Amino acid sequence: MPLNWFRYSSPATFYPLAGRMIPWFYGAAALLTVIGLYIGLVAAPTDFQQGDAYRIIFIHVPAAWLSMFLYVVMACWSALALGFNTRLSAMMAQAIAPTGAVMTFIALWTGAFWGRPTWGTYWAWDARMTSELILLFLYLGIIALRNAIDDPRRADRACGVLALTGVVNIPIIYFSVHWWNTLHQGSSVSLTKAPAMAAIMLTGMLIMSFAAWFYSIAASLSRVRTIMVDRERGAAWVGELKEVRNA
Amino acid sequence: MSIVSATATAPVHGPADAVWPAVCWAVGRDLTLALRSRAELGVQLLFYVIVASLFPLATTPERNLLATMGPGVLWVAALLASLLSLPRLFAGDHADGTLEQIALSPYPLVALVSGKIVAHWLTTGLPVVLFAPLLGLQYALDGEALTVLTAALLIGTPILSLLGAIGAALTLGLRASGSLLALLILPLYVPVLIFGAGAVEAARSGLGAGANLSLLGAGLLVALVGAPFAAAAAVRIALD
């Protein structure tokens, strides 16, 4: 049977598929969070340098990874939407932006709470923190631009152009901030990497990363379902949905 | 959208190939318009001067400190002045329908938008560059630092106009477009700010400004290649 790659590119067919996938991703995320937190908070030993404060990396590092990864995913959907003029790609890009912004915020917030006991300060103009802050501004800019445009099709394409401009800029921003920081390295904060991480800590962090990843997929899919129903509320397939008829 | 692109691509050896005439026409037209409202240009330049003059009042007139923060302050003021002038790039033409006619013309929109960006830089970026040595003197910068600051601004302010054009086109006709523009564009200006102010800093500390100026130049080349296309796409989106 020839595979139809475009079968699920229509909201009418993707809506039920997303609905079936969401519980699995939420379930996997919850399971992995329990395992990961058990490893991180109970099984992993206390770090001999940082004490128990290091345990925040089990939240912090996955959130930071996801914050950058989600921006790239969002830009890819935007490129698809601009290139092929597909509605669903733009809706996916729209659905991912808030999750990405939340991950960026969590990474910054937990970083500040880790920095206070370890570095003695909530905030330092460290290269990674600064570029993460700028990443948050980029996410907020895209969300704000989306909210300012009433016509969803125009908003799709405008946000797409902005997301692609941003994705070209992110490496430039990262390296500029990195070099700026190496010139201005403060004395109070030591940025040397933690000594090679124990295997169990790495395992916990990887499991938590998968948990954060699956959570992001589930949250984006839930949001894209809402967006689909909202945008296509005039379409016949929305009127035939069980949840719409019963509402 | 479809009509516009059809007319813009239809003639094979017609106006669609005439890139340079289109650029020159747009530069000439926008320069003429800008020079007929010189007061507006003067106000924007004054904004730059005033912002730069506020910082010593807010902090300290101590010469060593002023020389340390001077380059950064002047760069931030240049960023803000560029941001303030960006709505002029498309908004006026958008409001009276000229922009639509420009997009409908058989000339390539990228060339016309590039011309507008060049004119925008000539009327807003270049004055900032020319005033920088004067303001740098207020910040107790010496000869070499002044030269590097001016050179960095000369390379960097075109990047501000190029990137800003994308944001200006994206926010055409939106609610609160001014503050939205700041949110969209200022994060993208960060590398220009860092390399631009860093060039002066490096020159002052004896490292030599070459690396920073080269990076600014590389950024200018990348922006020159990419930004006009993104801005033209954004103009089309705004006109739909």
Image (cartoon, coloured by chain):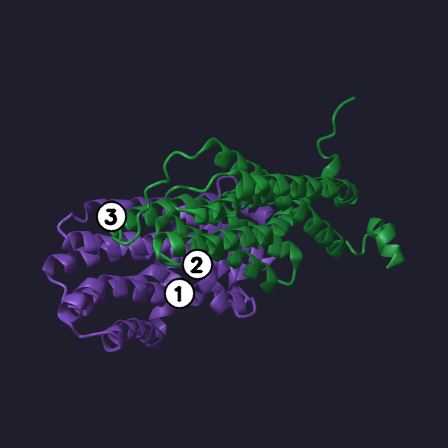
Position of residue A13 relative to residue B130, above or below, is: above
Residue A169, position in %: x, y?
42, 47
- Please state, as top left, top right, bottom left or bottom right, where the C terminus of chain A lies in the image: bottom right
Mark 1 touches mark 3? (CB < 8 Å): no
Q: Classify mark 2: helix, strand or loop.
A: helix
Position of residue B154 relative to residue A211, above or below, is: below
- Which sits earlier in the primary sequence, circle 1 or circle 3? 1
Colour assignment, chain B:
purple
Disc sitting over residue B185 in the figure:
2
Disc sitting over residue B73 in the figure:
none
Q: Nearer the viewer, residue A147 or B119?
A: A147
- Please state, as top left, top right, bottom left or bottom right, where the N terminus of chain A lies in the image: top right
Residue B219, position in %: x, y?
33, 47
Q: Could you tell me which chain the residue with mark 3 belongs to? A: B
Q: Is residue B205 left or right of residue B124?
A: left
- Identified by mark 3, the residue type is Asn
Residue A65, position in %: x, y?
50, 43
Query: Mark 1 sits on what residue?
Result: B83
Query: Mark 3 sits on what residue?
Result: B212
Residue at 72% x, 39% y is A24
Mark 1 touches mark 2? (CB < 8 Å): yes
Is residue B210 visible in the rendered structure shown here?
Answer: yes
- Identified by mark 1, the residue type is Leu
Quadrant for residue B47, please give it. bottom left
**Distance from Cα at disc 1 to Cα at disc 2:** 8 Å
Is residue B115 visible in the rendered structure shown here?
Answer: no
Position of residue B61 relative to residue A2, above or below, is: below
- Identified by mark 2, the residue type is Ile
Position of residue A52 relative to residue A142, above or below, is: above
**Distance from Cα at disc 1 to Cα at disc 3:** 23 Å
Colour assignment, chain A:
green
The crowding category of the residue bearing disc 2, from other C-alpha atoms within 10 Å (few below 14, some 14 to 19, many at least 20), is many
